[in-house]
Each structure stands twice: as structure tokens, then as C-alpha cells.
């Protein structure tokens, strides 16, 4: 019995112990689970914070990148606008300089005219004084003739008039010659400067008129694509080639403007390709511009090589050949400069052969004489000086350099070759049709020159020679004395200035000769 009770008690004790142990174990497990949950939560929160920080940093970096990118875009647009403003300011400055130069030229001309008027007034006063003196002399001589010879009044008057006329003509001729010589001595330098400045102004205006070309469009709708959104395409085209694109209301055309004829030709070629292709956007514009520039450069090099080969002047340096190729796209007074240079080369060679000079050297001078026109739009100075400087830099002989520099007589000619180039250049530029003058106008101008000379009394014949740059007048030696012939040349020159329009100068030569003939029987 006690053993049973003890067994029950042991079992109860074991159950109680098991119950208590299970309770404590469950309590312990719950605490451990709660602690693990807290740790997991803390870990998740920490990871969330780290992720949030990472996302925040990435967003800040992205925002900074966007701000920098937008700032760069804004600065790029600002630079473009500033460049456009600078270009506009430069164009305005050039126009203002041109206006100021024209004002100065007009002021100088007014001053020159005032000086001429003063000289004319002084001559009139001198003539008036001479007339008064002649009247006194006439009266004295009339009285003396009446006293000595006892001639009739009419006879005395006739003798006195003849004598006085001869004296007056001689004195007037001497006085006019002295005044003309004095005016030439004092005004020659000023006149040369004014003429040179006038020629430069005229050349500048002519050049500005020949700085545009047009590209025909299939329709006016393509103008919008050429301009692009907010002018993007037209700005890309101007930046890629360096010309001004003018899109106005003129139907079916777009205008390209540039002082560089080679660049303008490349722009024309690129624009034609873009219009034919139809795809007009900045990337395509850059591609077409590069291709057009490469094609033009190839044409320039091939043209220079071909011209030198055809003229048998292959020893010319490659840089000079390239400049000759650029002259293919340059015109002067409507005459292609490369064709003009080839003509001067051939004329100089023919004349050199006639007078026994080195034909190859003369042809070389003639071909290179207008070399400076390929670079004068990018440098200061006349094309003759620039061409001579470039030729000297490339190792050309001193005779060639001087012939180039002196072909417009800006420097003194130092050899016969320079004189040949001056003559050849004048002939090529003065021939009929060389500078937009039709044959009919040319013939009429020559006829008018001859008619102006032959309408004067005492003139036998008149001939217009040297393409209208000289008029030779043959006069009757029995009707006109030397003084009268000198006055006749002045009168004809004055009439030509008043009635005709012509480029350059016209020389008036009056020829008076006396011939004595006898027949032997």
C-alpha cells in the first residue's frame, strides 16, 4: 500500500515536474521568439534605412546631374546667342566703317572741287587782267599806227587784231601750260591717292554684289524643313560650312551668302544634295557639309594640277597649284579669274617669244599674277601684294615675285617680264566681252570716241585703238599750230569725261606733222 501510494506520489510529482518544465520551456520559447522578432524587426528597419539612404543619395546625384546638364545646355544656348550677336555686331561695324569711309571720300571730293573752283576763279581773274591789258595795248598800238603809218582805221584795226591775237594765243598757251604743270606737280600725288581709293571702293562694292548664290527649291514647303524647329537646321548648316543662309519670301529659291567663293560653292553643293535627299536634320547636314567640302577641295586640287599640266608648268609648288584651283570659283568684274590668268599666261608667253625673252618664265609670271585673289578675302592688303608675298614664301624667283607685285603698278617694275604682265593683264581685261560689255556696246563706244574727236575743226582723222583706251587724232598742220593742238587734246579729253562712261582711263593723243614734198622731173 505504501509502495502504491509512493508510486502515485512519484507519478504525481513527475507530472507536476513535467507540467512545470513544459510551462517554463514554453515561457522560455516565447521569450526567445519575441527576442528574435525584435531582432528581425530591427534588422529590417536598419536595412530599410540603408536602402532609403541609398535611394536618397542616388536621387540627389541624379538631380545634380540633371541640373548640370541643363546648365550646360543653357550655357551652350547662351554662347550661340552671343556668337550670333557678335556676328551681327561685326556686320554692323563693317557697314558703319563703309559709311564712314564713303563720308570721308565725299568730304575729300568736296575739298578737291572747292580747290578746283578757287583755281578757276583765280584763272578768271588773271584772264580779266590780261583782257584789260590787251585793251590798253590795242589802244596804244592803234594810236602809234595812226601816227607812224597813216593807215586807214580799218587796215590798222586788222593789223592790230592779227598781231594781238597771235600774242594773246601765245601768252594764254604759255600760261595754261604753266598752270597745268603746276597743278600736276602739286596734285598728282593727291589725285593718285583719290583714284586708288575710288577703285578700291568700287572693287569692294562689286565684290559684295558677287557674294551670293541661289539654290532652286522644288517647292516652298521645303523651306520649313531647311529652317527646322526654332531655326535648328539653318543654324547647323551655317555653323557646318560658314555661310549665311537667307530664306525670304522669294518663291522657289534660298540664298547663300559668303565672301569666300570656295566656301559658298561648297554650301551650294551641300544644299542641293540636302534638298534632293529630303532628309534635313543636324546630323545629315553635318554629313552633307563634310562631303561637299571634301568634293570642293578635290576639285580645287585637280583644277590646279590640270591647269599647270596643260600649260606645261608642272614645277609650280603644290600650295600655289591649290591657290590656282581656288581661282576657278572667283570672278572679277564678271570675268573668271582662272580663265583670265590663263589668258595672261598665254599672251605673256607669245610676246616674250617675239622679243627674245624666256617664254617659260613669262608664262609662269602670267599664270601666277592674280594669285593673291585666292587669299585676299582672308588677309589685309591688295591682291598683288598678297600674291607676291605668297610666291616669295613658296620659293619663287625674284623676277616672278616682282612681276606679281607690279602688275597694277603698286611697286616699280624691275624687269621686262613685269612690263609684259602689265600689258597682258590690260589686254585680257580690255578685250570685247571680257567684263560684261557686249560687242554692240563696245563698237558703239569706239565709234562715239572717234566722232567726238572728228567733230572739231582742223581734225583730219581719228582712230580709237587699244580696245578704246586711246584715241589718236591727226590734225591739219596748216590750220592748227602747236598751241592749238595742245588745247584740242584738252578739249577732247574734257568732252569724253562729260559724255561717255568707261572703265579706267582714255589717253588722247593729238598728232600734228608738216610734210614737204617735191617732184623731180
Image: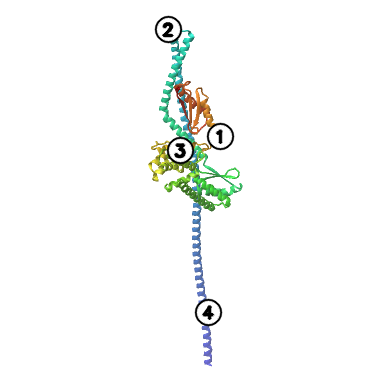
User: Which mark sits nearer the N-terminus, 3 or 4?
Assistant: 4
User: Which mark sits nearer the N-terminus, 2 or 1?
Assistant: 2
Label 2, on which residue? Answer: 148
Residue 23's label in the rendered image is 4
Kindly state the secondary structure of the residue where label 3 is placed: helix
What residue is drawn where x is 49% and y is 56%? 65
Q: Marks 3 and 4: which is nearer the front? A: 3
Dots 2, 4 in contact, CB < 8 A = no
User: Which mark sits nearer the N-terminus, 3 or 1?
Assistant: 3
Kindly state the secondary structure of the residue where label 2 is placed: helix
Vertical arrangement, residue 442 with respect to residue 213, above or below: above
Q: Marks 4 and 1: which is nearer the front? A: 1
Residue 409's label in the rendered image is none
Q: CA distance from mark 3 to mark 4?
A: 129 Å
Q: Marks 2 and 4: which is nearer the front? A: 2
User: Which mark sits nearer the N-terminus, 2 or 4?
Assistant: 4
Q: Position of residue 230 (x, y in %)?
A: 56, 48
User: Which mark sits nearer the N-terminus, 4 or 1?
Assistant: 4
Q: CA distance from mark 2 to mark 1?
A: 66 Å
Looking at the image, the residue that sits furthest to the bottom is 1
Dots 3, 1 in contact, CB < 8 A = no
Q: Position of residue 25 (x, y in %)?
A: 51, 79
Label 3, on which residue? Answer: 424
Label 1, on which residue? Answer: 440
Vertical arrangement, residue 424 with respect to residue 265, above or below: above
Dot 1, crowdedness within 10 Å: few (<14), some or many (≥20)? few
- For the residue pair 27 and 385, the one nearer the viewer reads as 385
Kindly state the secondary structure of the residue where label 1 is placed: helix
Q: Position of residue 486 (x, y in %)?
A: 45, 24
Dot 3, crowdedness within 10 Å: few (<14), some or many (≥20)? many
Amino acid at each position: 500500500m505504501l509502495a502504491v501510494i509512493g508510486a502515485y506520489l512519484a507519478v504525481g510529482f513527475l507530472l507536476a515536474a513535467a507540467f512545470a518544465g513544459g510551462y517554463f520551456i514554453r515561457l522560455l520559447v516565447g521569450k526567445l521568439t519575441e527576442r528574435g522578432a525584435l531582432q528581425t524587426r530591427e534588422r529590417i528597419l536598419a536595412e530599410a534605412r540603408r536602402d532609403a539612404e541609398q535611394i536618397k543619395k542616388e536621387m540627389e546625384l541624379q538631380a545634380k546631374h540633371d541640373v548640370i546638364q541643363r546648365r550646360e545646355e543653357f550655357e551652350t544656348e547662351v554662347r550661340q546667342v552671343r556668337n550670333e550677336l557678335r556676328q551681327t555686331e561685326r556686320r554692323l561695324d563693317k557697314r558703319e566703317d563703309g559709311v564712314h569711309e564713303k563720308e570721308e571720300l565725299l568730304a575729300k571730293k568736296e575739298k578737291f572741287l572747292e580747290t578746283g573752283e578757287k583755281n578757276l576763279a583765280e584763272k578768271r581773274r588773271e584772264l580779266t587782267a590780261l583782257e584789260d591789258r590787251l585793251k590798253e595795248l590795242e589802244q596804244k598800238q592803234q594810236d602809234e599806227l595812226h601816227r607812224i603809218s597813216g593807215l586807214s582805221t580799218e587796215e590798222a584795226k586788222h593789223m592790230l587784231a592779227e598781231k594781238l591775237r597771235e600774242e594773246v594765243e601765245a601768252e594764254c598757251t604759255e600760261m595754261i601750260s604753266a598752270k597745268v604743270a603746276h597743278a600736276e606737280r602739286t596734285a598728282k600725288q593727291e589725285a593718285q591717292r583719290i583714284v586708288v581709293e575710288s577703285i578700291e571702293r568700287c572693287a569692294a562694292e562689286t565684290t559684295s554684289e558677287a557674294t551670293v548664290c541661289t539654290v532652286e527649291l522644288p517647292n516652298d514647303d521645303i523651306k520649313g524643313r531647311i529652317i527646322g524647329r526654332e531655326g535648328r537646321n539653318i543654324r547647323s548648316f551655317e555653323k557646318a560650312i560658314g555661310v549665311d543662309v537667307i530664306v525670304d519670301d522669294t518663291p522657289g529659291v534660298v540664298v547663300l551668302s559668303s565672301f569666300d567663293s570656295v566656301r559658298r560653292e561648297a554650301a551650294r553643293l551641300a544644299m542641293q544634295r540636302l534638298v534632293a535627299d529630303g532628309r534635313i536634320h543636324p546630323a545629315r547636314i553635318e554629313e552633307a557639309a563634310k562631303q561637299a567640302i571634301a568634293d570642293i577641295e578635290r576639285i580645287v586640287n585637280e583644277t590646279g594640277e590640270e591647269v599647270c599640266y596643260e600649260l606645261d608648268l608642272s614645277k609650280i609648288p603644290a600650295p600655289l597649284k591649290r591657290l590656282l584651283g581656288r581661282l576657278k570659283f572667283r570672278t572679277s568684274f564678271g570675268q573668271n579669274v582662272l580663265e583670265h590668268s590663263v589668258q595672261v599666261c598665254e599672251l605673256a608667253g607669245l610676246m616674250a617669244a617675239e622679243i627674245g625673252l624666256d617664254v617659260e618664265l613669262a608664262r609662269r609670271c602670267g599664270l601666277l599674277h592674280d594669285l593673291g585673289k585666292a587669299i585676299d578675302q582672308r588677309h589685309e592688303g591688295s591682291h598683288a601684294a598678297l600674291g607676291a608675298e605668297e610666291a616669295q614664301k613658296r620659293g619663287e624667283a625674284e623676277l616672278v615675285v616682282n612681276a606679281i607685285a607690279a602688275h597694277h603698278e603698286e611697286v616699280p617694275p624691275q624687269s621686262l617680264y613685269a612690263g609684259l604682265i602689265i600689258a597682258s593683264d590690260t589686254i585680257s581685261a580690255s578685250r570685247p566681252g571680257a567684263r560684261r560689255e557686249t560687242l554692240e556696246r563696245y563698237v558703239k563706244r569706239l565709234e562715239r570716241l572717234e566722232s567726238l574727236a572728228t567733230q572739231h575743226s582742223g581734225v583730219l582723222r581719228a582712230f580709237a585703238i587699244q580696245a578704246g583706251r586711246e584715241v589718236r587724232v591727226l590734225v591739219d598742220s596748216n590750220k592748227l599750230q602747236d598751241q592749238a593742238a595742245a588745247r584740242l587734246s584738252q578739249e577732247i579729253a574734257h568732252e569724253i569725261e562729260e559724255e561717255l562712261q568707261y572703265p579706267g582711263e582714255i589717253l588722247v593723243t593729238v598728232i600734228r606733222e608738216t610734210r614737204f614734198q617735191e617732184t623731180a622731173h
